[in-house]
Image (cartoon, grey):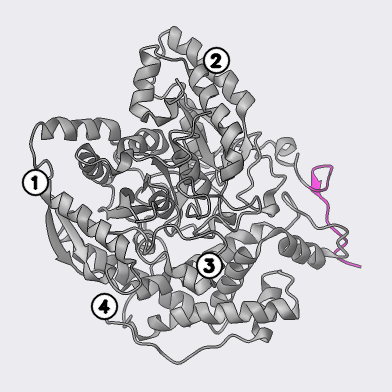
C-alpha cells in the first residue's frame, strides 16, 4: 500500500455540526457546536491520509468474513415476553409505548 | 487464606477440588477485598454479592455431589457491556442508568452454565468509547499499580479488578484495543479472539463489525480458562461463525508437555516484527521492554522475522472513520422511548429524542456520533465512509502478506505505559494511543497482550501478539510457554499486595 501524504485541510464549521446534530437528534448549543467542530476537524485531519491511498478497483469491506446470512426455518417462536421487556419502559399503556403528541 | 486472591485460576480450581477451601470461603474472600478496597479503584458499578454468596453455597453442594465442572464455584465479574438478566447493565452511561436487562447475553449464560460466580458488573468507558476509563458516568477507574494513573480502557474496570485481586478473571470487550490496552496498562494478559469466535448477542454494540468479547486474567492460562466457555457459534448472532471448538486449556497443557525440558520450546516459531510499529511516539522504556521480551522469545527458540504492515497512520484514520460511523447507527436505538434515560417534560417527540440523547450521552459519545453521522451524510459518504471500507480491505491484505512469512506478529501494545488521570488529552491525541491495536480489529484477527516488564516508575508494559484467523490456541500457547520461563506475569500491583 502507498505511503500516506497529507492532503488539503478540511475544516468542519459550526454550522455543519449543528446540521449533523439535527440529523443525529442531539441537542448541541452554539458554544458546544464550536467546540465539537474543532475536535472533529482535528479528527478529520487524521483522515486526510486516506485520500492518497490508491483504492482503484478495490471493493469496500464491511464484514471481515463476508459470509452469507444464516437462515432459519420460517417457524414462529413465541419467546418474546412483552411484559418483561416493557417493565423498564418510561411510559407504557396497554402494551404501547407512550410518547408526546406527534400530530396536532 | 489471606492471599487466595494471589492464586492463579488453575490453583483456585485445584484448591476447590482438593477442598483446601470452599467456593463460599473463596467468594467471601473476594467480596471482603472489594468492600474494603474498591473505593480506591472504582472498578465495580454494580455488586451482586448476595447472589454470589448463594451461588457459591450451591456450587459447594454440587461439588459435594460429584459435579466435576472445572470452573464450578470460581468467581469472576463481567464488563458492564454484557446484558445480565435482572441486574443493572449501564454500559458506563447515564443513558442506561436504570436499565435492568430482561435477558442474559450469550456469554453470560455460557459462563453461568460453566458454574462460575459473578461478583458484579465492571466499570468501563461509556459505550466502550475510550481508552482510559475516564469517560464513565460512574466515575474514573484508578490503576491498582498507581492510583494516580488510568487503568486503560474501555475495559478499565475489568483490568483494574483483576489487577487489584478482586476477581481472578473478568470478561471484557475489544473494538479497537479495549481488552489489550487495559491489560497492558495493568500488567495482565488479555485476549481478543478472531471476530465471529464469540457471540455478540447481548453485548451492547459500539461498532458491530469490530466488536468482540474476550477475557482478562493474570496469565495466558487464566485467559484460556475464561475464554473456553465464551466461544462457539450462536444462531442469535448473525456474525457468529461456525468453526472448530478448540480446548484452550488442554492445548496450553499439551504445549508444555510437548516442550518438556527443552530449553528452546518455541523452536520453529516465526515472530514477525514490523518497523512500522517502532517509530516516533513510542516511549523509550516501552520500546526497551518490548525488544528485551523479543530477545527472550529468541532465547526460547523463536526466530524474529522482519515484516511490513500497513502504515499505522492509515490504520488509525480508517478505524476512526468506520467505528464512529457504525456507532452513530448503533446508538440511534437510544431515544428515550422504550428503555433507558428519558428527559423530563418533553414538549414534543423531537424534543424527547434530542434532550434524552443529549442529556443521556456523555461528550465523547456525542463527539463520535457526530463524527460518524458526518461521515455518513450526503456528500461525504463516498469520500469518507466508502473510502475507509476500501482501505480496510487493503489493511487485511497487508496482514495476509505479512503472515506469509511469520506465524505471529509482535508489537508494543500501546505507545506508552498508563498515563496520569485527568491529563485531558484532546481526542485526536488520545486516539493515537490506539495506533498498535486497531489494525487487528479492522482485520478481525485474534490478538493478545502480555506483560513484559515495568517502567522505571513501576507501571506495567505490554507486548502484543497478533495471530492468524482462528489461531487463539497458538497465541495463548506462545504466551503460556513464554510465561513458563519468565515472571513478568507474576508481579502484583500495589493494591493486590494489600491484605484485608
In terms of depth relative to the viewer, which is nearer, B389 or B168? B168
The reply to whether discs 4 and 3 touch (Cβ–Cβ < 8 Å) is: no
| Residue B473 location, quadrant | top left
Regarding residue B44, the answer to whether it shows in the image is no
Residue B276 marker: none
Q: Earlier in the sequence, mark 3 or mark 1?
A: 1
To which chain does the residue with label 3 belong? B
Quadrant the N terminus of chain A occupies: bottom left
Q: Are marks 1 and 2 in contact (CB under 8 Å)?
A: no
- Residue at (48% x, 38% y) in the render: B107
**Can you name the residue that lies furthest to the bottom here?**
A8
Spatial separation of the CA atoms under disc 1 and disc 2:
46 Å
Query: Where does residue B373 sit, x and y in percent of width and height?
Result: 59, 73
Calculate the distance from the C-alpha at mark 1 to the C-alpha at mark 4.
32 Å
Both labels 1 and 2 in a single chain: yes
From what the image shows, is residue B450 above or below residue B231? below
In contact (CB < 8 Å): disc 3 and disc 1: no
Find out whether the residues at labels 1 and 4 contact each other: C-beta distance under 8 Å: no
CB within 8 Å, label 4 to label 2:
no
Which image quarter: residue B119? Answer: top right
Front residue of B380 and A7? A7
Is the residue at mark 1 from the same chain as the one at mark 4? no
Q: Which residue is mark 1?
A: B267
Q: Chain of mark 4?
A: A
**Where does the magenta region start and end?**
A90-104
How far, Cα to Cα, is label 4 from label 2? 58 Å
Label 2 vs label 3: CA separation? 45 Å
Q: Could you say where residue B364 lies in the image, as x and y percent from the top left?
A: 60, 65
- Residue at image mark 4: A1
Amino acid at each position: 500500500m502507498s505511503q500516506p501524504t497529507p492532503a488539503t485541510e478540511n475544516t468542519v464549521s459550526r454550522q455543519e455540526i449543528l446540521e449533523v446534530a439535527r440529523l443525529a437528534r442531539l441537542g448541541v448549543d452554539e458554544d458546544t457546536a464550536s467546540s465539537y467542530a474543532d475536535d472533529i476537524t482535528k479528527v478529520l485531519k487524521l483522515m486526510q491520509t486516506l485520500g492518497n491511498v490508491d483504492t482503484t478497483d478495490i471493493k469496500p469491506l464491511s464484514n471481515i468474513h463476508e459470509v452469507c446470512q444464516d437462515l432459519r426455518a420460517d417457524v414462529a417462536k413465541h419467546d418474546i415476553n412483552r411484559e418483561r421487556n416493557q417493565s423498564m419502559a418510561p411510559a407504557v399503556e396497554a402494551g404501547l409505548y407512550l410518547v408526546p403528541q406527534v400530530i396536532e | 487464606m489471606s492471599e487466595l486472591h494471589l492464586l492463579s485460576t488453575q490453583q483456585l480450581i485445584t484448591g476447590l477440588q482438593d477442598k483446601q477451601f470452599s467456593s463460599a470461603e473463596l467468594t467471601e474472600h473476594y467480596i471482603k477485598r472489594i468492600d474494603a478496597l474498591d473505593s480506591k479503584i472504582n472498578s465495580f458499578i454494580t455488586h451482586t454479592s448476595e447472589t454470589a454468596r448463594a451461588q457459591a453455597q450451591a456450587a459447594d453442594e454440587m461439588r459435594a455431589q460429584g459435579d466435576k465442572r472445572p470452573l464450578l464455584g470460581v468467581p469472576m465479574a463481567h464488563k458492564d457491556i454484557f446484558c445480565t438478566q435482572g441486574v443493572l447493565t449501564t454500559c458506563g452511561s447515564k443513558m442506561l442508568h436504570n436499565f435492568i436487562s430482561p435477558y442474559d447475553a450469550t456469554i453470560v449464560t455460557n459462563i453461568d452454565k460453566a458454574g462460575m460466580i459473578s461478583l458484579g458488573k465492571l466499570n468501563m468507558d461509556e459505550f466502550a468509547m475510550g481508552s482510559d476509563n475516564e469517560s464513565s458516568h460512574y466515575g474514573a477507574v484508578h490503576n491498582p499499580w498507581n492510583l494516580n494513573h488510568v487503568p486503560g480502557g474501555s475495559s478499565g474496570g475489568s483490568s483494574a479488578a483483576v489487577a487489584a485481586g478482586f476477581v481472578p478473571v473478568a470478561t471484557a470487550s475489544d473494538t479497537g484495543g479495549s481488552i489489550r490496552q487495559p491489560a497492558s496498562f495493568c500488567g495482565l494478559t488479555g485476549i481478543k479472539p478472531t471476530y465471529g469466535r464469540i457471540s455478540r448477542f447481548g453485548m451492547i454494540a459500539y461498532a458491530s463489525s469490530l466488536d468482540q468479547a474476550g477475557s482478562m486474567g493474570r496469565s495466558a492460562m487464566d485467559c484460556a480458562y475464561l475464554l473456553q466457555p465464551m466461544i462457539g457459534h450462536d444462531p442469535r448472532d448473525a456474525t457468529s461463525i461456525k468453526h472448530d471448538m478448540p480446548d484452550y486449556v488442554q492445548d496450553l497443557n499439551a504445549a508444555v508437555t510437548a516442550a518438556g525440558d527443552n530449553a528452546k520450546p518455541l523452536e520453529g516459531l516465526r515472530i514477525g516484527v514490523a518497523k512500522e510499529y517502532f517509530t516516533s511516539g513510542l516511549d523509550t522504556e516501552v520500546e526497551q521492554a518490548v525488544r528485551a521480551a523479543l530477545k527472550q522469545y529468541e532465547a526460547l527458540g523463536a526466530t524474529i522475522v522482519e515484516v511490513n504492515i500497513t502504515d499505522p497512520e492509515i490504520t488509525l484514520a480508517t478505524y476512526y472513520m468506520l467505528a464512529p460511523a457504525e456507532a452513530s447507527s448503533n446508538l440511534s436505538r437510544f431515544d428515550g422511548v422504550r428503555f433507558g434515560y428519558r428527559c423530563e417534560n418533553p414538549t414534543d417527540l423531537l424534543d424527547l429524542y434530542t434532550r434524552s440523547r443529549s442529556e443521556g450521552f456523555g461528550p465523547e459519545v456525542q463527539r463520535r456520533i457526530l463524527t460518524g453521522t458526518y461521515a455518513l451524510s450526503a456528500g461525504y459518504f463516498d469520500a469518507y465512509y466508502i473510502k475507509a471500507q476500501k482501505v480496510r480491505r487493503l489493511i487485511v491484505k497487508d496482514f495476509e502478506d505479512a503472515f506469509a512469512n511469520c506465524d505471529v506478529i509482535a508489537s508494543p501494545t500501546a505507545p506508552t505505559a498508563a498515563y496520569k488521570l485527568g491529563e485531558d488529552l484532546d481526542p485526536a491525541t488520545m486516539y493515537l494511543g490506539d495506533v498498535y491495536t486497531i489494525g487487528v480489529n479492522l482485520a478481525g484477527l485474534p490478538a493478545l497482550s502480555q506483560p513484559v516488564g515495568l517502567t522505571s516508575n513501576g507501571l506495567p508494559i505490554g507486548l502484543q501478539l497478533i495471530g492468524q484467523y482462528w489461531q487463539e490456541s497458538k497465541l495463548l500457547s506462545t504466551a503460556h510457554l513464554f510465561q513458563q520461563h519468565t515472571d513478568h506475569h507474576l508481579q502484583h500491583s500495589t493494591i493486590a499486595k494489600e491484605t484485608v
